[in-house]
Image (cartoon, grey):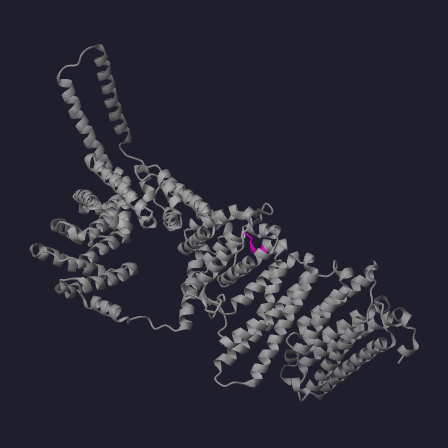
């Protein structure tokens, strides 16, 4: 009533600053009394009921009066200077928030008597709604000079924006449209006054609240989709609500995108929030193991309307160093459910980098020591590490949207295919200055203890060999060859490198293969450790024949040299390398062996077999390896093998199978036994071989190792189909359990009937178990530990060490004395004979020491 008669330029001094603080206090006092008295409300207590309704009615009138004030100012002024209404926005927003909080908590405040005041509460909410709407209209008319440095105005506008932000958190679950409009106003005002308030805004609070609202709306959307999927009947009301919620998701995401674009330099402390938002969304969306189960149609609708907005957000953050640091932090510790989304995010980043300048690629693709406590690993290392953590998604496997091909329908691909294809595509656009990083990342992954990670790196490396120049391929083969030769002994790194060498060798140009042969000549025994890992099939016919001849000649000569010497266990390691090289020839280029070379190999193999006995094979690892190499060599020549040697081999293996031997030894025995299916066994030795064969298969089929069991079932099936001695097949099935096992395998039955949901749940549990021991291991620690050598073995103490030293000292003294006598005069005739006898005793002692280990 008074406002029309007052000068709008003096409203703040003469009216608002005097009246509004008292108004706020009055409203707070009424709200306190309302909350306190509400506990005693009941339909019988008319006095309290009347009191509460009177308070609520007064509140409604007060809100209406404030709305009138705001409307009057809007109607009488074209533009508003905030200084002239300084007290109004903060006071009104305080009252609005207090009102919304009371309405939101009304069920708990009024307990079971809410119906007694619900009409006035609705009126109160409507008045607060109208007041805020009118206030936002007024604030939209506020003009602030971009060049002004009035700190009070700047501070007041910042307070307004953050007060509206607080209101957003209250009304988010009360009125979605109102909530969205409030957010729209916050973003609009932040951008409108950006140049003035950008340094004062609490950007982290705004980003955090916006991300929380995105996640809340997204989860609501998923819940509605899940309900519709589970429900048989189609409910149009549910679907409309789903679409409305999805639209809200998109609105919030676009608001975040817009805000991030304008205020990016101020968002360094919000990068963790951005990162978590992306991970949380993708952890709840298919094909994540932890996703809500929704229909394919709903998946496509959510992806098309909402998830697409995350892609430009990542594009905006791509050049922002704090975001790079968060994503590639070496100490990043993510729970199981976020490892798969992290892998997807890294692939998305990798897809975007080719279009970025060199500086951005370098930022992502190089390691960096940001501070004493913070390290950033390269994108490629992060991808391999993250991929390694997705054991459940790889084993299930989950399927992702594939790449579209010309003229072909889009097909789903596994996670392995997805990462591999995108990684290879990225390699094609890799900046030349970063090749050293690429080489280091690939090699580090190849040397990983995780088999699937190593395989991914090998696939990418092979693609690089095919995509790059022939010289690059030859260079990589040479590097890998030198690495293999420098390996100190058997280890998983050597196995991985040998597989890579075998694969890369196929991509070498023939002239480079010839250079390789000259550089690592197979004529020299020291290069056999290399040739044992190469497939001779990769060589052109002429080179293959020449190399096979040279390796066979050197290999058989080395075997004979071992046979002619003292044949100590310590020399078995080099002998095993030779046998492995000969086996590589038989497996990959057996047709290149002429009769003479076949005979030479068979002769040394037969002679070596004669030195094997049960005790040595059971106790000595090197002998076990020799045994497992000789068996496939015997199997290769099985058709021309001496029947007596076959009998010896079968008899020895039957005895050994009753002992505890490593799996690789039993697998070698299994391969040999299955090769006998092609052979007709002479009648003279059938009665001694066939019972042993049935005994061996019975023991192998009863083995509890799942790996051996599967291979045995396959080998037994192959043997049973090919053998001429059908009578021993039933004898191999020694028990009803074994018989049922074989029948189930042949009929492809006996599998666990597991639903898709049960399978996913099992894989999640397995992943949790696998991940738990490493949950506190950081990326950097994992990277270091993968190549960490074992601690040195403690020095072994011998109880008779001093006595041994004393005896050896005496022998050395006697030799010195004999040497001194020889210098003084001629030796007697018997001396040489006695010295030869002593030499024989020395050799005997040396052999005995080697057998002890």
To which quarter of the image does residue 127 belong?
bottom right
Residue 436 location (% of width, % of height):
51, 45
Please tell me which residue is depicted at 19% across the width and 54% down the height of the picture.
658
- Can the viewer see residue 368? yes
Q: Answer with left or right where residue 376 lies relative to residue 102.
A: left
In the displayed structure, 692 sits above or below 296; it is above
In the displayed structure, 118 sits above or below 844; it is below
Q: Residue furthest top?
A: 824
Instruction: Report if residue 555 lies within the magenta region.
Output: no
Residue 394 location (% of width, % of height):
43, 62
Instruction: Report if residue 328 lies within the magenta region.
Output: yes
Return the residue nearer the eye: 277 or 853.
277
Please tell me which residue is depicted at 61% across the width and 72% down the height of the picture.
249
To which quarter of the image does residue 114 belong?
bottom right
In the displayed structure, 308 sits above or below 562; it is below
Residue 689 location (% of width, % of height):
12, 56
Residue 519 location (% of width, % of height):
37, 38
Point out the stretch of residues depicted in magenta.
Answer: 326-330
Return the residue nearer the eye: 681 or 552.
552
Q: Answer with left or right where residue 606 lies relative to residue 311.
A: left
Quadrant location of the C terminus in the rendered image: top left
- Can the viewer see residue 273? no
Please tell me which residue is depicted at 41% across the width and 66% down the height of the picture.
396
Quadrant location of the N terminus in the rendered image: bottom right
In the displayed structure, 203 sits above or below 845; it is below
Please tell me which residue is depicted at 26% across the width and 29% down the height of the picture.
804
Q: Residue furthest left?
A: 684
Q: Answer with left or right where residue 116 lies relative to residue 586.
A: right
């Amino acid at each position: 009533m008074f406002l029309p008669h007052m000068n709008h330029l003096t409203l703040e001094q003469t009216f608002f600053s005097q009246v509004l603080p008292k108004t706020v206090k009055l409203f707070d006092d009424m709200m306190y009394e309302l909350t306190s008295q509400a506990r005693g409300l009941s339909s019988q207590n008319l006095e309290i009921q009347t009191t509460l309704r009177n308070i609520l009615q007064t509140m409604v009138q007060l809100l209406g009066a404030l709305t009138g004030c705001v409307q009057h100012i809007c109607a009488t002024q074209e533009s508003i200077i905030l200084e002239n209404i300084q007290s109004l926005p903060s006071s009104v927003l305080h009252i609005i928030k207090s009102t919304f909080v009371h309405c939101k908590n009304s069920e708990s405040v009024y307990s079971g008597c809410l119906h007694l005041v619900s009409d006035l509460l609705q009126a109160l909410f409507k008045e607060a709604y109208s007041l805020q709407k009118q206030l936002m209209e007024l604030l939209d008319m506020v003009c602030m000079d971009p060049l002004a440095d009035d700190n009070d105005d700047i501070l007041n506008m910042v307070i307004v924006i953050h007060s509206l932000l607080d209101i957003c958190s209250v009304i988010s679950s009360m009125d979605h449209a109102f909530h969205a409009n409030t957010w729209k106003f916050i973003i609009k005002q932040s951008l409108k006054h950006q140049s003035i308030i950008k340094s004062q805004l609490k950007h982290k609070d705004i980003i955090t609240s916006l991300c929380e609202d995105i996640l809340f709306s997204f989860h609501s959307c998923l819940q509605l989709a899940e309900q519709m999927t589970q429900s048989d009947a189609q409910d149009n009301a549910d679907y409309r609500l789903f679409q409305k919620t999805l639209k809200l998701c998109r609105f919030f995401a676009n608001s975040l995108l817009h805000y991030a674009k304008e205020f990016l330099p101020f968002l360094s402390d919000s990068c963790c929030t951005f990162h978590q938002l992306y991970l949380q969304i993708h952890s709840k969306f298919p094909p994540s193991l932890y996703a809500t189960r929704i229909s394919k149609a709903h998946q496509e609708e959510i992806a098309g309307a909402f998830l697409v907005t995350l892609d430009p957000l990542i594009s905006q953050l791509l050049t922002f160093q704090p975001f790079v640091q968060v994503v590639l932090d070496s100490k990043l510790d993510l729970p199981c459910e976020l490892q798969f989304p992290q892998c997807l995010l890294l692939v998305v980043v990798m897809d975007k980098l080719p279009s970025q300048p060199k500086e951005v690629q370098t930022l992502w693709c190089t390691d960096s020591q940001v501070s004493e406590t913070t390290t950033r690993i390269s994108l490629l290392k992060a991808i391999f590490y993250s991929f390694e953590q997705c054991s459940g998604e790889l084993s299930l496997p989950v399927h992702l949207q594939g790449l579209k091909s010309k003229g072909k329908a889009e097909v789903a691909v596994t996670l392995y295919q997805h990462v591999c294809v995108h990684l290879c595509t990225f390699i094609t656009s890799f900046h030349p200055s970063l090749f050293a990083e690429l080489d280091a990342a690939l090699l580090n992954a190849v040397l990983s203890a995780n088999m699937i990670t190593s395989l991914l790196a090998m696939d990418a490396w092979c693609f690089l060999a095919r995509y790059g120049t022939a010289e690059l391929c030859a260079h990589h083969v040479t590097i890998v060859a030198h690495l293999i030769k420098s390996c100190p002994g058997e280890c998983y790194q050597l196995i991985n490198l040998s597989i890579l060498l075998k694969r890369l060798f196929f991509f070498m140009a023939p002239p480079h293969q010839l250079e390789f042969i000259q550089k690592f000549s197979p004529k020299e025994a020291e290069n056999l450790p290399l040739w044992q890992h190469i497939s001779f099939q990769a060589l052109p016919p002429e080179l293959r024949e020449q190399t096979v001849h040279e390796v066979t000649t050197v290999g058989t000569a080395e075997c004979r040299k071992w046979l002619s010497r003292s044949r100590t266990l310590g020399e078995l390691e080099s002998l095993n390398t030779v046998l492995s090289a000969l086996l590589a020839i038989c497996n990959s280029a057996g047709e290149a062996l002429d009769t003479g070379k076949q005979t030479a190999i068979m002769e040394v193999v037969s002679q070596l077999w004669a030195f094997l006995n049960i005790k040595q094979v059971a106790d000595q690892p090197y002998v076990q390896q020799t045994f497992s190499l000789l068996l496939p060599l015997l199997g290769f020549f099985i058709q021309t093998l001496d029947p007596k040697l076959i009998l010896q081999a079968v008899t020895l293996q039957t005895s050994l199978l009753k002992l505890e031997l490593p799996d690789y030894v039993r697998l070698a025995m299994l391969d040999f036994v299955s090769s006998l299916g092609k052979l007709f066994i002479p009648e003279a030795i059938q009665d001694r071989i066939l019972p042993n064969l049935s005994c061996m298969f019975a023991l192998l089929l009863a083995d509890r190792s799942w790996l051996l069991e599967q291979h045995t079932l396959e080998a037994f099936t192959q043997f049973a189909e090919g053998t001429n001695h059908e009578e021993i097949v039933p004898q191999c099935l020694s028990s009803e359990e074994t018989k049922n096992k074989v029948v189930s395998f042949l009929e492809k039955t006996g599998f666990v009937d597991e639903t898709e949901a049960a399978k996913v749940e099992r894989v999640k549990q397995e992943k949790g178990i696998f991940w738990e021991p490493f949950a506190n291991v950081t990326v950097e620690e994992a990277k270091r530990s993968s190549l960490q050598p074992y601690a040195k073995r403690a020095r072994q103490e011998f109880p008779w060490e001093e006595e041994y030293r004393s005896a050896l000292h005496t022998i050395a003294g006697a030799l010195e004395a004999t040497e001194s006598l020889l210098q003084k005069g001629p030796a007697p005739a018997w001396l040489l004979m006695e010295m030869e006898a002593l030499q024989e005793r020395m050799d005997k002692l040396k052999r005995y020491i080697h057998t002890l280990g």
